[in-house]
Image: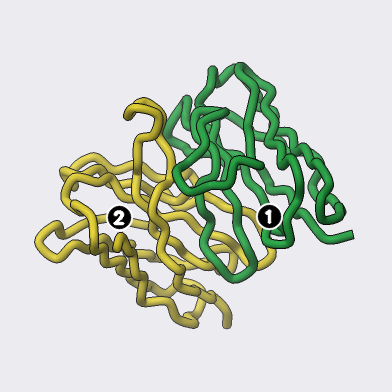
Amino acid sequence: QEQLVESGGDVVQPGSSLTLSCVGSGFTFSSSGMHWVRQAPGKGLEWVAIVWNDGINKYYADSVKGRFTISRDNSKNTIYLQMNSLRAEDTAVYYCATDDYFGSGSFPGFGIWGQGTMVTVSS
Amino acid sequence: DIQMTQSPSSLSASVGDRVTITCRASQSISRYLNWYQQKPGKAPKILIYAASGLQSGVPSRFSGSGSGTDFTLTISSLQPEDFATYYCQQSYSIPPYTFGQGTKLEIK
């Protein structure tokens, strides 16, 4: 059974740091690009970052560039999101998701999703 | 960046109704458009890929159409389990991977 499980969410103060983890199972983790997507309370979905399967290529949303770092350890089937200089507007449920290709492998999309982990930034 | 705009933002309908949700891209995205369903407290799941491709396991009452800038998601006969929030997402010019703001489908 394909599964992603996030952890690490917490209540933290503005300006602090936090690291989220996401462990995958039931699929070939090392072959999959991996995303972080977040959802502020009562709001829509916002893509945060992607790391390709090689762990080298990484891209970020402008809203987190320079503050967040995505990484992966394929030996542990795990991706991470290091979040620094946290702001109130970073408060959200953070989901990890696989970067899948649909329609004979031509159309990118978010395939497997985790259940999410909540990050609250508040003084 | 490509902006995605959904309409309506919310919609009330009854079981058995036919429902259509619209998504418009700020520039042409060919058929690189996905639709997701999200139920309260749950992660999203993909319903439609490439504008009209039905993801495995998704009921056939869901269908998608469109290309270029204008797309629609149609539910032919609403079932109780379909009341949820629906998001479109473009995968033509990435990153960033942009979503529409969502359409909340509620029971009338």
Q: Chain of mark 2?
A: A
> Does residue A27 appear left or right of residue B49 in this picture?
left
**Residue marked by disc 2:** A70
- Residue A44, percent from left and from top: 64, 54
- Residue B58, percent from left and from top: 53, 47
* Residue displayed at 31% across by 56% down: A69
- Element at label 1: strand
> Does residue A77 appear left or right of residue A17 in this picture?
left
Q: Chain of mark 1?
A: B
Measure how far apart labels 1 and 2 are at the Cα level: 28 Å
Q: Depth check: A23 or A112 in front?
A: A112
* Residue displayed at 61% across by 18% down: B67
Chain B, chosen colour in render: green
Q: Extreme left residue here?
A: A75
Q: Name the amino acid type tagged 2.
A: Ile
Tell me where residue B79 sits by quadrant.
bottom right
Q: Name the amino acid type tagged 1.
A: Thr
- In the picture, which quadrant includes the C terminus of chain A? bottom right
Q: Is disc 2 surrounded by few (<14), some (14 to 19) or many (20+) residues within 10 Å? A: many
* Residue displayed at 46% across by 68% down: A116
- Residue B65, percent from left and from top: 64, 25
Q: Which chain is yellow?
A: A
Q: Is residue A113 above or below residue B56?
A: below
- Element at label 2: strand
Q: Depth check: B43 or B18 in front?
A: B18
Q: Is residue A102 above or below residue A97?
A: above
Tell me where residue B42 sits by quadrant.
bottom right
- Residue A66, percent from left and from top: 38, 51
**Residue marked by disc 1:** B85
> Does residue B30 appear left or right of residue A22 in this picture?
right
- Select label 1 or label 2 by which is in front: 1
